[in-house]
Image (tube, grey):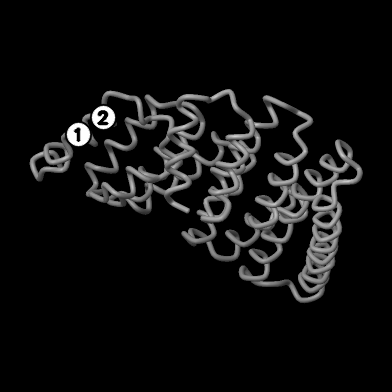
Amino acid sequence: MEDAVAYYEKSLKIYPWNPDLRVNYGNALTRLGRLDEAIAQFAEALRMIPYHMQACNNLGVAHMKKGSFHKARECFQRALEISPEFPDAARNYRESSSALSKAEQAAGRIENAIRTGGGDAALQVKLARLKLQIGDVQGAYSAYREALALKPGTVEILYELVLAYADSGEYDRAIGLLQSMRESQPDSAEVPYNIACLYARHGKPDEAVLWLRQAIDKGLDDMDLIRKDPDLENIRETAFYRELVEGQGTLFSPGTQ
């Protein structure tokens, strides 16, 4: 499957306007579990051809695998509007509707438990995850904030909230939250690295490069991660990235730390 991904990546450099090629690339990425990248490819295919039923269906499949049942059902519904006799979309629509209903019921049970017993941080986090699955983004934010009120500064909860913001396109909020974490983790390379990733996803390569430099200064030396992380795609053509890839010995030398 890695060979297939490499083939599609090369082909898309020659035929970037080909939506079917993007769908096939997205399928390969989905099989590898690279769901955010797959979603981007299916979305781009749909931007080119809004009535591409296979792209719409496969976008829904990727969302299902991410646990975004609300988004998945919307995609399958749209695929059926394009082609009412599309059997894969019909089956997937039923499955996503069932998953969405179960998630809604689970969220309701947790909300009742919290109302009657107060709940703890772990319960609030479970509620937040279910809220994201059913498409209640604001409810998820609220549950994460309640969890943080019960367990202030918990890194795992903070990162989940950061991802929730980023996945909803609220990059400024996600980046702001990460920047606030630097106060408690001043020597962390992970925090500036994640800020770099968010700026790159947000289409701000200059800011991304600035924060990636800071991550390297803090001790980040995982070149394989930097090469392969899809979040950094928007900085691949910068002079800094090319120097990083071609002359990493200099950039990662002790004298630059």
Q: Position of residue 38 (x, y in %)?
A: 58, 44
Q: Which residue is mark 2?
A: 242
Q: How many marks?
A: 2
| Kind of residue indicated by mark 1 | Glu
Return the residue at label 1: 246
* Viewer-closest of 63 and 216: 63
Residue 212 horizontal/vertical position (percent)? 32, 37
Kind of element beneath mark 1: helix
Q: Which mark is residue 67?
A: none
Q: Mark 2 and mark 1 in contact (Cβ < 8 Å)?
A: yes
**Quadrant of the image containing the C terminus:** top left
In 3D space, how far apart are the residues under numbered discs 1 and 2 (Cα atoms)? 6 Å
* Horizontal relation, residue 146 to residue 104: left or right: left
Horizontal arrangement in the rendering, residue 8 relative to residue 52 (left or right): left
- Closer-to-camera residue (33/209): 33
The one of 176 and 229 positioned closer to us in this rendering: 229
